[in-house]
Amino acid sequence: MKPLIPPAWNPNSYLPVAVPGVGVLAAMIGLTILGFLTANLVGRTVVQSGENVLDRMPIVRSLYKGVKQIFETVFKQDGTSFRRVGLIEWPGPGLWSICFITEQAKGALAAGLPGPDHVCLFVPCTPNPTTGYLVMIEASKVIEIGVTSDEAFKLIMSMGIIQPPDLAALGKTVERHAPEPQPKAQPDNAAAE
């Protein structure tokens, strides 16, 4: 950054001792000004003109609008999507998976599901939580746990290596909700003869 600083503003040009960090300070000031301009008038204008270009493209338009709506819904600060973490028996009995409780099933979706009170869940894949499964399940079959979404994402992306500090309590929660094992039927000796 030093060559870009005008000599009148560079203290090294008029001080007998070299001042370290002038380039770093100039870079920080420049980035702050650039961020301010981007976040305000200039940035909004660039984003709006980019959206106008995408809005004129037939196939890209529908994809862009769908992806934009998903990101706005998922990442809005006041929303509850992906804020609640739970456990479900997935993909089979005795196998437990972390899930994110997204919304209560409503409207035509709720009407089409058998039984009352279903919720929509997102069951992410490991180690890439951007892929996964949308599952509609009865709310009574979901165990909501006291893990933050950040801790759950760390657990998923690390493949279980980075665990939340209170995960020992999580095992007890699963154990408490696990179905009782069914006794195996003994063969009847009289029927065999």
Image: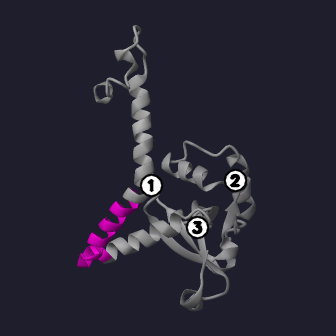
* Of labels 3 and 2, the one closer to you: 3
The residue carrying pointer 2 sits among few (fewer than 14), some (14 to 19) or many (20 or more) residues within 10 Å by Cα, namely some
The residue carrying pointer 3 sits among few (fewer than 14), some (14 to 19) or many (20 or more) residues within 10 Å by Cα, namely some
On the image, the x and y values in percent for residue 52 come to 30, 72
Specify whether residue 10 is in view. yes
Main secondary-structure element of the magenta-colored stretch: helix
As drawn, the label of residue 170 is 2
Which residue is at the front of the view, 94 or 133?
A: 133
Q: Secondary structure at mark 2?
A: helix
Q: For mark 1, what is the residue?
A: 39
* Of labels 1 and 2, the one closer to you: 1
On the image, the x and y values in percent for residue 113 come to 57, 87
Which badge, 3 or 2, is on the more N-terminal residue? Answer: 3
Q: Secondary structure at mark 3?
A: loop
Q: Is residue 115 above or below residue 163?
A: below
Taking the image as shown, residue 80 lies to the left or right of residue 11, namely right
Label 3 to label 1, Cα distance in Å? Answer: 26 Å
Residue sitting at x 56%, y 70%: 121
Q: Is residue 42 inside the magenta stretch?
A: no
Which residue is at the front of the view, 59 or 56?
A: 56
On the image, the x and y values in percent for residue 143 come to 69, 65
Q: Is residue 45 inside the magenta stretch?
A: yes
Q: For mark 3, what is the residue?
A: 81
On the image, the x and y values in percent for residue 84 come to 64, 63
Q: Is residue 57 above or below residue 150?
A: below
Q: Quadrant of residue 90?
A: bottom right
Query: What is the span of residues highlighted in magenta in the rendered image?
Result: 43-61
Which badge, 3 or 1, is on the more N-terminal residue? Answer: 1
Taking the image as shown, residue 75 lies to the left or right of residue 144, namely left
Q: Amino acid at mark 2?
A: Leu
Q: Is residue 89 above or below residue 128?
A: below
The residue carrying pointer 1 sits among few (fewer than 14), some (14 to 19) or many (20 or more) residues within 10 Å by Cα, namely few
